[in-house]
Image: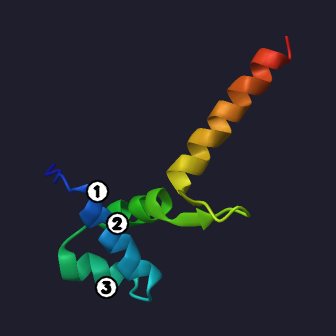
Amino acid sequence: MNHKQYYDDFKKSIVTLVQNGKTQIQVSKEYGISLSAISRWVKLYSTVTTEDGDILTAKQVKDLQKRLQGSKRKTSY
């Protein structure tokens, strides 16, 4: 299997293309990237804006959820 390494900035630019209306299939064909990679990047780099105006990536939200669950476990003993 041939695994290519991509820089984060490139991945984020691909996610931006998808968020701005290009389909994952179009981007896949145009850049020669697998659909599974694009889908994974969209999940990883899509952003969420909090009530406070902070912008978090899906990965940051997931990391925060894990930390919160870990804190809950520690305090439940």
Q: Which mark is residue 26?
A: 3
Can you give x and y, in whole percent of width and height, for residue 49 in the image? 63, 66
User: Crowding at label 2, few (<14), some or many (≥20) Cα neighbours within 10 Å?
Assistant: some
- Could you tell me residue 20's position as x and y percent? 44, 86
Determine the secondary structure under disc 3. Answer: helix
Horizontal side of residue 20 vs 65, given as left or right? left
Q: Is residue 7 above or below residue 18?
A: above
Do the residues bearing badges 2 and 1 touch, measured as CB atoms within 8 Å?
yes
Q: Quarter-wise, where is residue 24 in the image?
A: bottom left
User: Dots 3 and 2: beta carbons under 8 Å?
Assistant: no
Whichever of callouts 3 and 2 sits on the residue coming sooner in the sequence is 2
Q: Position of residue 53 (x, y in %)?
A: 65, 65
Helix, strand or loop status at disc 2: helix
Counting other residues with Cα less than 10 Å from the Cα at mark 1, is it few (<14), some (14-19), or many (20 or more)?
Answer: few
Q: Residue at x 32, y 72 (%)?
A: 14
The image shows residue 67, relative to residue 45, as above or below, that is: above
Q: Which mark is residue 12?
A: 2
Residue 59, compared with residue 43, is above or below; it is above
Q: Which residue is mark 1?
A: 8
Q: Nearer the viewer, mark 3 or mark 2?
A: 2
Instruction: Where is residue 15? Give x, y as percent.
Output: 39, 71
Residue 41, compared with residue 2, is above or below; it is below
Q: In terms of depth relative to the viewer, which is nearer, 65 or 43? A: 65
Residue at 34% in and 81% down? 25
Q: Amino acid at mark 3?
A: Gln
Residue found 72% across the figure and 31% down from its top: 69
Q: CA distance from mark 1 to mark 3?
A: 20 Å
Q: CA distance from mark 3 to mark 2?
A: 16 Å
Q: Residue at x 50, y 65 (%)?
A: 46
